Every structure is written in structure tokens, then in C-alpha cells.
Image (cartoon, helix red, strand yellow):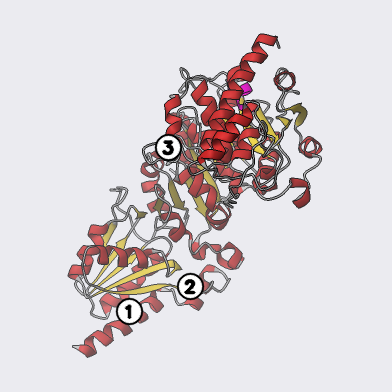
Amino acid sequence: MEQPKINELKDIAFKVREHIIRMSGDGGCFIGASLSCADLMVYLYKQFLNVNPGNLNDPERDYLFLSKGHDVPALYGTFAELGFIERSRLSNHLKTNDFIYWHPNMNIPGIEFYSGSLGHSLSVAIGVALDCKIKGQTNKIVVVLGDGELNEGSIWEGALVAAAKKLDNIVAVVDRNKFQANIETEKLLPLESISAKFEAFGWKTSTADGHDFESLERSFSNLPYEKDRPSLIVAETIRGKGLPSIEAQANRWFVNFSAEEVRELLAELHGGKTTTLTSEEIIAR
Amino acid sequence: MTYEEILKDLVEHDKRFMVLTAENRAAIRNLPDQIGDRFIDTGITEQTLVGVSAGLALRGRIPVAHALATFLTMRAFEFIRTDVGISGLPVKLVGGFSGFLSEANGPTHQAIEDVSIMRGIPNVNVFCPADEEDMLIGLRKVLLSPDPFYIRYINTKPAVRHSKDFEIGKAELIGEGTDITLLTYGLMFAEALKAREILEMSGYSTGLVNMRTLKPIDEEVILRAAESTELLVTIEDHFVTGGLYSIVCEAIVRNNHKAEVLPIALQNTWFKPALLADVLEYEGFTGEAIADKVLSRMKQHDYRK
């Protein structure tokens, strides 16, 4: 990947992080997971997926399903920067005059399906992938999974079915930030090795640095890894990436920051000193 | 045409139709060989079956998804509610072996709350045909409707020649009475028919209504029966909670009507697992047992007079 392209992606991702931080005040949002997948969302929508504001009804567009729906602020921010929605709509976050709420819904252009309940979107994606196969279309269907979400049994049903149906048009990406709502994933239900588990289910896998666009590009550039097999990319990420004051902390999952803290966090993102946060976390599960 | 022939015909003439199952092929055994890639078996994965169906529907398909009624409506409940209910996509969910049709399988297989939970989901409609003929009469309209539907699949022989005049939300009026109206759906229709005969022979003018769709419900037929007869009787192989008894009571109260309603339904427990005829006998759901219950209620009426 050329340096100007990398700089462009970094610049967009920075703006997406600003949007996410703004959404973490005045009602709050799931900031940790949103920041961990922000680079991934920017890479996918700007660089990888054949989907843009002009082709949202084209049956041959690529699809992205955000299965771990609570990190939708990363999607809202990306959509605002790439022209799917007006930037000004983000100020409607959590307001009754719009649909910019804590989980994805189809009233937002670009969001393919409702999500929020974990473990659903892989099966929905399989339905879409099957239909594309039957019609001989070559669209790619990306499903973004949380690592904590892999606790859900329906994920493993879907893993079996996608492999059995030879759906090499499916690419699942695990946002491997190593946390679930309240706790580190390995302290609750150890997931390692995620790759080995999916390989055993018949998938082909790779690992990428989810904050490094060149690394992501390497993983996404030679899909499918094997004909007739679904692909899985483990994107190694850091929860809260970009804000040292909240990075990799178990109690920064859903947070409602004060206006002052939001200002300080924006300053921190811009390279200022690490913020001292006092707002308590709110665990919404 | 049989059930399978109708599905095959729809698949062949309408590009939207797909037939799916979570490895329950009882109703569609011949289709895999006949419709090729328009048939999908997801394995014993009810949740994935429903999610896949929603995905297909997102792409403009009309998926007709089959599984045992218990596992379809309960194991996958939240998938139905979330992926089908919220989106309102035209997914058709076909539940087999519902109610007493699970016979000797035992309580794990008894779908006797399916109507209650399916009708509780916004956008999801409910079709409970009386027997195979009734199901086949309504099938095309239900499958072609733009709404999600739960279908209580039934393949029993018809007890009457059903009216070919089928509308979603319209009941089939078998006969009107001036004393009693029996309101029923599904398997219990045949027993209600027998009960009606006994009640008529006992001197009570008795109406009989085959509800056909429980959502949307034919409120008009319920309210008319409440006006014109002394006693309404709801008959269903379903828990008393949330099914036809609840639907009828809701309709009456919502419209500020008054009526006496006798529920013949399963109370707060599962039914005795056995072959169908023995279940009906044991649980008191034969035409004779139903008529006895209604007669004893009517005798209280007569006494009061």
C-alpha cells in the first residue's frame, strides 16, 4: 500500500475516532469496542468493499454485517466521513428525531440489517451468500464478529453451515480486542486458538494487526484463501485504541462521559496529556 | 395438488421461492431431488435456519422454512422475533407436529404455546389450518403474502369439504347457531365438528367456526357470535394462555362486548404422551368429551333460567 493511501486512511480513521468520542457523551456509547474496530471499518469501506452511497440497492454490491452491533458508532463515523450519511446527523445520536442509536438498524443508509443481539449476523450472511452463489454473483459478504460474541452457540452453528455449504464468498473478521463486556475473554471462556477452532470447522484463516492498514491489506488481498472454503481473519486490536486513558480497561465498555471529559478525550486523541476520567462505567448487560 | 406439489410449483414459477429445513424433511421428502439448489438443509440448527431465511429474504427471496414446531418457535424464538419480526421480511415458518400431533414424543416435543408466542411478535402472522385440505386451500395466499407467517402444518384427512374461499383474516363459518358457538382451529376442528353434532342432537342450536388465521383474527365473526349466541366455546390443542381463548376474550373486551366464554384448552401442564386417539381420550378432547363439558355448562344456564 502506498504511503499517501495509508495517510488518507489514517486521516479518515482519526476523524471517525473523533466522532466516536463525541458520541460517548450526552448518553454515551460502547466506546471501547467502537475504537477497537474503527480502523477496520475505515479499511473495509474505503479500501475493500464494493459498496458506496451510490450502489446501496445494487444486488451485486458487497455486504458488511456488523454482528457485534454495539460498536456501531464506528460505523456511523465511517458512514459520515464517506458520505453515506450527513455528518450533521451524528449530532442526532440517541435523539428521537433520528435512528442513530446504540445498535444498528436499517433506517441508516449502508446498514444492511438490524443487529445488537449477538450471534445472529453470521446466519443472515449465510443466507445472503447462498443467494449470491445461486445467482452466480461474486459479491463478497463480510461479517464482523466480536471475540466475546464467539461465546454464542449460534456462531458455531453458522461456522459449520458456512463450511458445509462451501461459502468461499464469506469473510468473517473477529475484532480480537480480548475483552467482553465485563472481563477479559481469556479469563471467562478462553477462546484461543480462534484460528485453530475455525480451521477445524473447515475455514481458512489468517491474522492481521487490526490497526495497521498494510497488515489488513495483506489479509484481505488474497481472498478466498482456498476455493470452496469460508475465510476468517483474526484482527488483533486494542479496546479503546487511540485513547491511552481507556485502552484495554475492563470498565471502559459502555461509558457516558461528561462534556468536560469528552473535551479532554478529544484533546488526548490529538496528542494532549492522558485524561483523568471520573465518570463511572455503565455495564448495560 | 399436495403440499409438496404446491411448493414445487411455486419454486418453478416464482423465482423468489426457496424451501429450507433444519433437517426435518417429513413434509418435503421429495423436494430435494426436484428443486435442486432452491432446497437448503441447514442441519439441526434452528437458529441458523431462521437467520439464513432472513438473509435470503433480504435478497428478495421468499423462504419457506421447515422444522419441528417446538424447536422452530422456541429454540429459535429470538431469531424469529429479531431477524424476522423486526425486519418484517416475508419469511414463512412451517412448524410440524404441533399440538397433539406430537403424539407420544413427550413434553420436549409439545408445541402448545406456539400460537401464543408467535402472535406476540409484531409483523408475524399465524395460519392454523384445520386439516390438509384446509391448509392447501390457504397455502398459496399465505406464502405469497408480503408478511412473515407462522404456519401450523397439518396433514390430517379433512372432516368436511372446506370452502375454497380463503382470505387471510377471514374465518370459515361452518354453521351458525342461536345457543352456542364453537370456535376452533387446527386439529381440534374435527373433534369440534363431532361435538357440534352431539350438541345439536341434544337440542342446542350450535354454530361452528374454523378460524383459519389466528393473526390477523376475524374479529367480526367472534363479535357476531358473541351477540347471537349464549355461550362461546374455544377449542384448541394449546395452552389456555395466549391462544384462541385469549384472542377471543381480547376481541370481546376491546370492543366493549359481553360474552360467556368456555375455554377447552390445555391448562397449566403438558399432555399425556400417547398415540393421538389415546391422547384425545385421556385429555378429554374427543368430540364427546367436548360436548359433555359444553352440555354441563349449558345445563347451569338452563337452571339459572
Residue A99: image tag: 3
Residue in front for this viewpoint, B147 or A270:
A270
CA gap between label 1 and label 2 equals 16 Å
Contact? badges 1 and 2 (CB < 8 Å):
no
Task: Say what secondary structure mark 3 lies in.
Answer: loop
In the visual, does A133 lie left or right of A150?
A: left
Q: Which residues are magenta?
A: A40-45
Dot label at residue B294: 1
Whether callout 3 and callout 2 share a subunit is answered: no
Say which chain tag 3 marks: A
Q: Nearer the viewer, residue B37 or A252?
A: A252
For mark 2, name the chain.
B
Residue A44: say if magenta: yes
Q: Main secondary structure of the magenta part?
A: helix
Q: Amino acid at mark 3?
A: Phe
Numbered disc in front, either 3 or 1: 3
Q: Residue furthest bottom?
A: B303
In front: mark 3 or mark 2? Answer: 3
Are circles 3 and 2 on residues that touch, CB within 8 Å?
no
Disc 2 crowd, CA 10 A, few/some/many (<14, 14-19, 20+): many
Q: Quadrant of the C terminus of chain B?
A: bottom left
Tag 2: residue type?
Leu
Q: Quadrant of the N terminus of chain B?
A: top left
Q: Which residue is mark 2?
A: B280
Q: Residues within 10 Å of mark 1 (few under 14, many from 20)?
A: many
